[in-house]
Image (spheres, grey):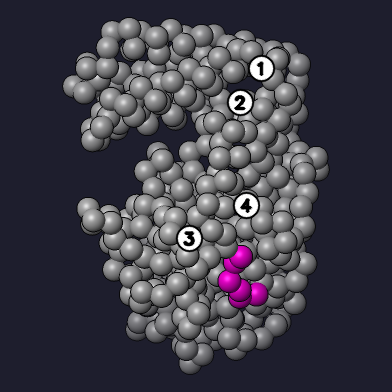
Amino acid sequence: MSERWDRGQVLGLAPDEAAAKAAGGVARPAKWAGTGCDDEAVWGECQGSGKSVYRTCVDLATPAFRCTCPSRKTPCKHALGLLLLWSEETVETGPRPGWAAEWVEDRRDRADRARERRSASAAKARDPKTVERRERRVDDGLAELDQWLRDQVAHGLAQAEKAPYRLWDDAARRLVDAQAPAVAGQVRGLAAVPRQPGWPDRLLEEYAMLRLLVRAYQRRGELPQGLRDTVRARVGFTVPQDDVLGEGERVRDRWSVTGSRDTALEQLTTRRVWLRGRRTGRPALVLSFAAPGAVLDASLVVGTEIDAELAFYPGSQPLRALVAERYGPAETGTPEGTTVQGFLDEHATALARDPWLERWPATLAGVRLARTEGGELHVVDDAGDSLPLRMTDPWHLLAISGGGPVTFAGEWTPHGVRPLAAWQEDEGVVIL
């Protein structure tokens, strides 16, 4: 029997607080009939209002959800309530009813067909003629971007403050046509810079980093393999997961899940989950993606540790990874943090390897909150070194710490640290 999730993992799947709260009212055995589970799924029929009976099934592998209720939330309160009962071991193992078996088997068939399509697409992408054709298009697209960047600087940045969004959208669209999607996303994001304080310096810096990427790609044959892989990834060349699992660097450790953040962009939600190796001190980033209505991977829960082997994507500063193999269930634990100076040294080393890094995980031990004379909030360690915090509502974090030391995890950006989680001796982990 597969390891049952705890209550935190289940509620972590909720699309919003209202659904999580409603699930508690549904998670009562008296409301359910025909419940059961096996290694792959859990199912049951929930009594709704009046004579309505809702058939609910959860595919535990993905996870994925099916319910006959009219709710548009995924997962709905019935799926969450069923999972809460399952996590409390009040759902017993048994054979699947026909309706649940049909849905699970149909999902498996569709997953197999999707894998076949990905394999065929990957094989096509490796075809020498396809590779040559794409690289030629990327070369042309980046050459055009190079000229565009020089034009922006030559004409002066003053025009950018009142320029319409299409100035950057048109340039991004041409890069999409040139099959350089990652660069296209960076260019499109520049439209928001002139609407921010201190924008001229920031915009010039972004233009410079883009030009550095263009020049690095144009001279990729002269780069060491790791940096070449990084440049290709920054441009938009992807590495199939099968290649990462089969050929990527593998590292086994006890990995602390230190933080998670979801961002939505252009009908796609991305979840970033940060991990830190207890033995190696190494950071890792696990990404998952979901279209509207789909559910993001919730198998890595902040505040837990997993004994696992990660497979890292290639690059000069390997950071993104896949969970290749788990060895036992997740356990609660506090991550091993570092000092502010230790973190800055880590980040400087990483930035020297990959100058296009946008964010880097910070896990700090024994830090306190303090305000500067200007009222800005910082985290400060015992040596007096500090990092500025980037947050709109600090009261939750202030209440957790109570002026005492905490283990703190966040995302470091050029604007400061965005808090993700904190561990206090008496409270355990608190998600921020």
Label 2 SS? helix
The residue singled out by tag 2 in the image is: 231
**Residue placed most toward the observer, 249 or 26:** 249
Amino acid at pointer 1: Arg
Q: Residue at x 28, y 25 (%)?
A: 200
Distance in Å between CA atoms under marks 2 and 1: 8 Å
Specify start and end residues of the magenta stretch as a single range. Answer: 331-336
Label 3 SS? loop
Q: Residue at x 66, y 71 (%)?
A: 330
Q: Residue furthest front?
A: 383
The crowd level at tag 4 (other Cα within 10 Å; few <14, some 14-19, many 20+) is: many
Eye-nearest disc, 2 or 4: 4
Q: Give the total number of marks visible in the rendering.
A: 4
Amino acid at pointer 4: Pro
**Residue placed most toward the observer, 71 or 139:** 139
Question: Is disc 3 in contact with disc 4, using a CB cutoff of under 8 Å?
Answer: no
Distance in Å between CA atoms under marks 1 and 4: 27 Å
Q: Residue 217, located in which quarter of the rendered image? A: top right
For marks 3 and 4 on the same chain, the one whose residue lies earlier in the sequence: 4
Is residue 63 visible in the rendered image? The answer is no
The residue singled out by tag 3 in the image is: 383
For marks 3 and 2 on the same chain, the one whose residue lies earlier in the sequence: 2
Q: Residue furthest left?
A: 162
Q: Residue 282: horizontal and vertical position, in percent?
A: 66, 53
Distance in Å between CA atoms under marks 3 and 2: 37 Å
Looking at the picture, does residue 7 appear above or below residue 172?
Answer: below
Q: Residue at x 35, y 77 (%)?
A: 402
The residue singled out by tag 1 in the image is: 220
Amino acid at pointer 2: Val
